[in-house]
Image (cartoon, rainbow, N blue to C red):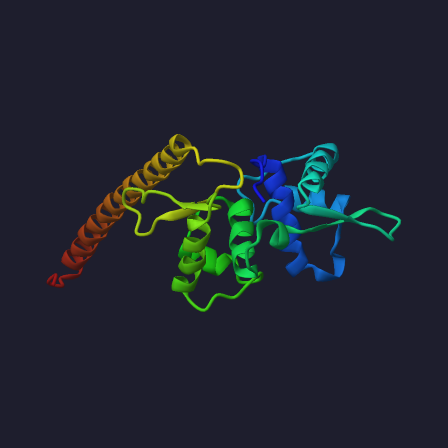
Amino acid sequence: MTLRTLSPLEARVLGVLVEKQHTVADSYPLSLNALVMGCNQKTARDPVIAATEAEVLVAVDALKALSLVVEVSGSRVSRYEHNAKRVLGVPDQSIALLTLLMLRGPQTAAELRANTERLHRFADISSVEGFLDELAAREPALVVKLPRAPGAREPRWAQLLCGPVDMTAQASTVGAEDFVAAGEIAALKAEQTRMAAELAELRALVDRMAGELGIAPR
């Protein structure tokens, strides 16, 4: 089945449903209120958003039309569960990786292995890379390996459920990271200079006190 491109909020809703299935199993399927809270939580999310209940409900309805989300009956409150594995036709390991990419944005294979711990425990990084390579080789591809940023030791991966990755935005992000790193280096150099000056003052004070006491400085 070929899916249309998902909106960022639709991807966030789908990712939250998969995540909460594993992390709060007692509360799953999720109510609309729980789903909104999961979308807007400030930890383990990039970017952090503030979606309204109405906006999340629109996203849910759109995902229902794609069979990616199912509304569960038999409860006074409507509850929702995902159907990602069957619709996308990929194993649990791949669903875990896609979920983290939808919730946290581009990440390295090492970061994905650490962050998917509660969804699936990968044996090693090469195992993560194997599933990523399979997702990238699909037609259409579900993930893409981004060009390695200058100074970075590992390339990052991004999901393609929301369409092609904006490489201009990625370059801007890399530039901002480089600027911060340069600022941190400048701050460290300034601190080093300040400490060297203080050390020189202390040495001068010790030499003066030693002279007053008639002790030969070492």
Question: If the image is split into quadrants, where does the N terminus sit?
Answer: top right
Q: Position of residue 100 (x, y in %)?
A: 53, 51
Near-viewer residue (134 or 193): 134
Near-viewer residue (205 or 17): 17
Q: Residue furthest bottom?
A: 123
| 92 lies above or below 39 | below
Q: Residue at x 87, y 53 (%)?
A: 74
Judged left or right of residue 120, residue 21 is right
Question: If the image is split into quadrants, where does the C terminus sit?
Answer: bottom left
* Count of marks, rendered view: 0
Q: Residue furthest top?
A: 168
Near-viewer residue (211 or 47): 47
Q: Position of residue 48 (x, y in %)?
A: 57, 39
Judged left or right of residue 120, residue 168 is left
Q: Quadrant of residue 149?
A: top left
| 53 lies above or below 153 | above
Judged left or right of residue 91, residue 154 is left
Q: Quadrant of residue 212?
A: bottom left
Judged left or right of residue 59, residue 78 is right
Near-viewer residue (145 or 181): 145
Q: Position of residue 4 (x, y in %)?
A: 58, 36
Q: Residue at x 39, y 47 (%)?
A: 156
Q: Position of residue 59 (x, y in %)?
A: 68, 36
